[in-house]
Amino acid sequence: MPSSTLAPMTVKEILAKLESMGDDARRKHNAKVGPDGTVAPDNQFGVKHGDIRALAKKIKPPKGADNRDLALQLWATGNVEAQLLATLLIKPASLSAKELDAMTRSTTCASVAEWLNSYVVAQHPERESLRETWMKPKEKHRWAARAGWHLTASMINKGEGGLDVEALLDRIEKEMPKAPPETQWTMNNTLMAIGIHHAKHRKLAIAIGEKIGLYKDWPMSKGCIIPYVPVCVPELVKRQA
């Protein structure tokens, strides 16, 4: 029977494999402006995310081993699919906070940011200290700020304490209109999370969303809820009842 894992592969070999898995239609789709206003860079092959996950399972090392060096080399290529693959291969705890901060700031696009924040940043033992750094008002880096707000929204959704919700609402009202699109996305997620999980602040969260108007003109798809806070918060609260 053929092995379910691949023999050790170099970065060059992995890039060639990813390129062979891509297609023009997917590349064109990826190149369109994303929901948060970003566009995938030219350095991408157009590989389906499911195929990247399948490849990661084949080249992931045995339990107890570490693909840290390979993952960091893949990340350094700047290729979208290589960076997505890197987030699945690396063990979060193998990175120092400084290394993870550098990775976060070198993110290439929104899809990579989502995987990095969900699979690496959120699992890192120093995520809270990183969140505090990235959430400082003086933080102007779009991907770092995005990661900070991503972690904050996650804390609210999980019901974790320790957050000054009123201060967060104040910051969102003042900062979100002028924030970069990449940061606006997770700021809006935080506003949404507050509106859903903090009943006493729901009315204010909805009012802030209406005042800013972010995603109000989001294209409506059947069965989906647009991320416009005045629409999505009441609907999601109703669904949870």
Image: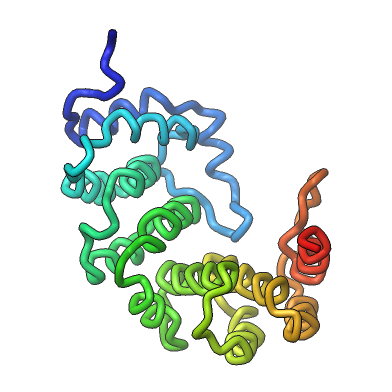
Up the image or down, 179 lies above or below 120; here it is below
Residue 116 sits in quarter = bottom left
| Image vertical order of residue 209 relative to residue 233, above or below | below
Above/below status of 71 relative to 166: above
In percent of width and height, residue 96 lies at 21, 66
| Residue 216 seen from this side | no
- Name the quadrant containing residue 42: top left
Q: Position of residue 10 (x, y in %)?
A: 17, 33
Does residue 24 appear left or right of residue 202 in this picture? left
| Residue shown at 44% from the left, 30% from the top | 51
Residue 90, image x, y percentages: 27, 49
Query: Which residue is depicted at the point 74% across and 76% down?
Result: 209
The foreground one among 169 and 76 is 169
Residue at 25 percent across and 51 percent down: it is: 76
> Going by the image, does 196 lie left or right of 180?
right
Asked whether, in this view, residue 74 is left or right of residue 133, the answer is: left
Specify the quadrant that holds the C terminus. bottom right
Tag count in the figure?
Answer: 0
Could you say which is closer to the camera, residue 179 or residue 166?
A: 166
Q: Quadrant of residue 6?
A: top left
Residue at 36% across / 81% down in the picture?
133
| Image location (x, y in percent) of residue 204 | 76, 85
Classify the position of the N terminus by image quarter.
top left
Q: Is residue 106 left or right of 162 when viewed as pictured?
A: left
Regarding residue 87, the answer to whether it shows in the image is yes
